[in-house]
Amino acid sequence: MTQVDRCGTIRGDRCADGEGPITMEEIIVRFDGDGAGIGGLTWGQQQVFAAMLELGSSLGLGGVVPVTDGRTVEDFAEELRFFMSRYGALRTLLRFDEDGGVTQEVFGSGETTLLVLEENDAGDAAEELLATWRARTFDYAHEWPIRMAVVRRDGVVTHAIVLICHAATDLGGILVMMKELAERDPVTGAALTPYAGMQPLDLVAAQLQPPARRTTEKAMRYWEEHLRAVPAARFAPPVDRGEPRFHRVIWSSRAMFLASERLAARLGVDGAAVLLAAFAAGFGRVTGITPFVAQAIIGNRFRPGLGGVVGAITQNGLCVLDVADLTAGEAIERARAASMTASKYGYYEPDARRRLLDAIERDRGETFDLACFYNDRRIQLPEAGAHEATDEELRAALAASAEVPVELPLPFFNEKLMVNIDDVPGTAQVTTEVDTRYLSLADLRAMLRQMEAFTVEAALDPTAPTGVAPYAGASR
């Protein structure tokens, strides 16, 4: 079933001979699966791999999970075998030609390794290994796009560590993996049903067919209609303010969460639409720039045939939203419609969008700025109506709003503003990344406070104005 070999250490001062606090073994895991062959990249892979190269990061997805159910090293080896055998995306290596082209090779069989860290003291082996893995890009041509390890202490597995290269899958794909892992036969560990998703090369083939081309054509008509109508700039001209250029600020607001859920219940909309409207209103109040134009991250698993795919199918949708001179309720309704439309036209061939942007920039004689992003990355939205906060509860919750104390300068950020809604129960946690040459840290913090203010004001009175004036052609 498994073969065990000794290997080196994860740090020079931690010996693999049993004398240090950690020893490490490799469990060789052999696998075989369907869908082998060579082909191009899927649309989602093309988009995320370009971002990975620009950032110099594999944008790994995963983390450390405590193990409390008694699973053994052998159990995790079989889980890794299950993943590798079932999902072609994890059996894929990238191939690079001399002209810069990228293809992928999906293997029908092979072997990988499960690392076992034997921890002899109460250390942080799991978190240390995860940090090491995150800092080291995957070797795309030679390394399988999943790294998996377990920590064992006194013969008992205490933690599992998994990191998956973003070119292999996205968060939605990982949720499919977890669901299907839980649905295995409890005795044999085998899948009870065949894999229903498309393997990578099947999806590539489908994206070359006439229906997919028509989907791209419709999406490009939508993008062109809006991009030719809105201002080219999203921000004021760059200014070096003498502060760290790339920064992360995280804001946590229980009040914004309660207000968004109350609005969702009373207006009959999704809470996600409320927070999108809050971003548009906060951005407009602080910068004076309207309409709000952002690229929204679209999961695409609502599309026929893509729900069960383990692969990178997330793409950028175009969200155009004018909230000037409206009531808050009207702005939220516009946000709902804008979000749905962005999702509808967020699936396309990336080269077609690049050609469109080049053409628009040539015609307008100016560079078009799409470096503002929005990503509601919550896995499961709260159930509407579970608890509708009172006015007093909303106002009282404002006192607890605060920055999460992990604010960091970033070594690099390839956009100008990214606003993420995090998956933290019971609060609206907003993680922002910013290029301070385009939006100062003071203005970023003001925008977060205005997002909260808009949401609470709207919950107290949906007929309240958004506080955003029509764009006057100037900004801060």
Image (tube, rainbow, N blue to C red):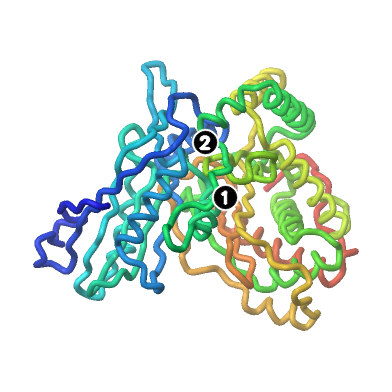
Q: Is residue 59 left or right of residue 346?
A: left
Residue 95 lies, in percent from the top left, at: 38, 26
The residue where tag 1 is placed is 172
Residue 234: quadrant of the picture = top right
Residue found 63% across the figure and 39% down from its top: 316
Residue found 70% across the figure and 55% down from its top: 279
Residue 214: quadrant of the picture = top right
Disc 2 from disc 1: Cα separation: 15 Å
Task: Please tell me whether mark 2 sits on a helix, a strand or a loop.
Answer: loop
Q: Nearer the viewer, mark 2 or mark 1?
A: 2
Q: Is residue 440 left or right of residue 225?
A: left
Crowding near pointer 2: few (<14 within 10 Å), some, many (20+)? many
In the rendered image, the vertical position of residue 365 relative to residue 146, given as above or below: above
Which amino acid type is shown beneath numbered disc 2? Gln
Q: Is residue 441 left or right of residue 345?
A: left
Residue 120: quadrant of the picture = bottom left
Task: Please tell me whether mark 1 sits on a helix, a strand or a loop.
Answer: helix
Residue 376 lies, in percent from the top left, at: 64, 54
**Which of 137 and 471 lies nearest the eye of the viewer?**
137
In the rendered image, the vertical position of residue 54 relative to residue 364, given as above or below: below
Checking the image for residue 129, the label placed there is none
**Which of 187 and 65 lies nearest the eye of the viewer?**
187
Residue 351 lies, in percent from the top left, at: 59, 24
